[in-house]
Image (cartoon, rainbow, N blue to C red):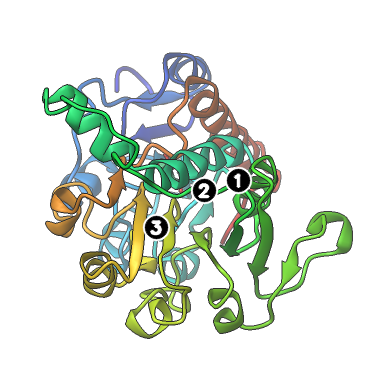
Amino acid sequence: MNGKKTSPVILVTRKLPPAVEARIARDYECILNGDDRLYDDAELVDQSDGVDAIVCCHTEHFTRAVIGQLPDSVRAIVNFSVGVDHCDLEAAGSKGIVVTNTPDVLSDATAEITMLCMLGAARRAGEGFHMVRQDLWHDWSPTFMLGTQVTGKRFGIVGMGRVGQVAARRARGFDMEIHYHNRRRLAPAAEQGAIYHETLESLLSVSDVLSLHCPNNPDSRGLLNAERIGQLPDGAIVVNTARGAVVDDEALVEALGSDRIRAAGLDVFNGEPDGIHPAYRELGNVFVLPHLGSATVETRDAMGFRALDNLDAIFAGREPADRVT
Ligand code: 8YV
């Protein structure tokens, strides 16, 4: 930060797309993270000294302890993410800190990754990729590496929010029958023929592919546990592009190991990136990606601009469109 403070000072915790950084640097005095180094809690607090707002990602953990140590100058935590489970919203709210997120703009990209995870799991793409790249592929036969097709199967959605609804549309492209469980039933226009299940148990029993799209909160944490996995049809496929915390890893790994579950396609993990369950690196029937849900040029730009629209609103004294607390 150089010179006299003439505009709000913004801490940007991660390296954002160039067009987004150009806009924020044009409009604010900002502290960028050119090296894209991950700040630990202490650095996050140190870096916030003299700052009016923080633009951050899900990689920064705004726990009650961190929020408690933020200087009073911090008026807002402006997330470059739709998920806000890395922020203690109650702690932020009680300190008068506005928190915003970036909904909508990443729904298409995340639904694309959902399809990739579903197909990758159903058609054994991880194993096939490994065989070719490791020069382990030396034969073809009619029974070689058979997967299962998703066409015409039942696609069960947990959490029919923005991403869930786009995923439903994409799955319809495979002639899948759409089922969902949500806190509230959608209006018929949004449902588009999807079959509502009032209980999760009812949804599980018909889900040939179960796809998780709910946020990580106390109600959803560990939702896919051993008992619930037991309610899925034999040979079901599990897809997670929401948050690792929604899954009980021990239970899923056990079900994958015993082939109770045919395969899983996972883009998100408990303890990601370094502390993921080691079995996910080993099991052949798991198709894994490194949290790529929103990782397209178009989407990351849109997320950045949406975050900056929220930031601008806050400093213009307007209500930000995506205020979560
Ligand atoms: C983002 C996501 O890329 O927005 C979210 O909640 O999970 C991702 O797709 C990431 O969180 C950016 O901070």
Tally the numbered discs.
3
Residue type, label 2: Val
Q: Secondary structure at mark 3?
A: loop
From the image, which quarter does the N terminus lie in?
A: top left
The reply to whether discs 3 and 1 touch (Cβ–Cβ < 8 Å) is no
Could you tell me if residue 52 is visible in this image? no
**Where 21 sits versus 230, above or below?**
above
The disc at residue 103 is 1
Of the image marks 3 and 1, the number of the one nearer the N terminus? 1
Q: Label 3 crowding class (10 Å Cα cut-off): few <14, some 14-19, many 20+?
A: many
Cα separation between marks 2 and 3: 11 Å
Disc 3 marks a residue whose amino acid type is Arg
User: Which label's residue is closer to the chain start, 2 or 1?
Assistant: 2
Please tell me in which quadrant of the rendered image residue 144 appears. Answer: top left
Residue at disc 3, CB closer than 8 Å to ligand 1 = yes
Q: CA distance from mark 3 to mark 1?
A: 15 Å
Give the residue drawn at x 47%, y 36%. 294
Residue at numbered disc 3: 243
Rendered position, 94 above or below 313: below
Circles 2, 1 touching at the beta carbon (< 8 Å): yes
Q: Quadrant of ligand 1?
A: top left
Residue 165 left/right relative to 249: right
Q: Nearer the viewer, residue 234 or 316?
A: 234
**Where does label 2 land, which residue?**
82
Residue 62 percent location from the top left of the image: 33, 57
Image x and y of residue 160, in percent: 65, 61
Instruction: Classify mark 2: helix, strand or loop.
Output: loop
Circles 2 and 3: CB atoms closer than 8 Å: no
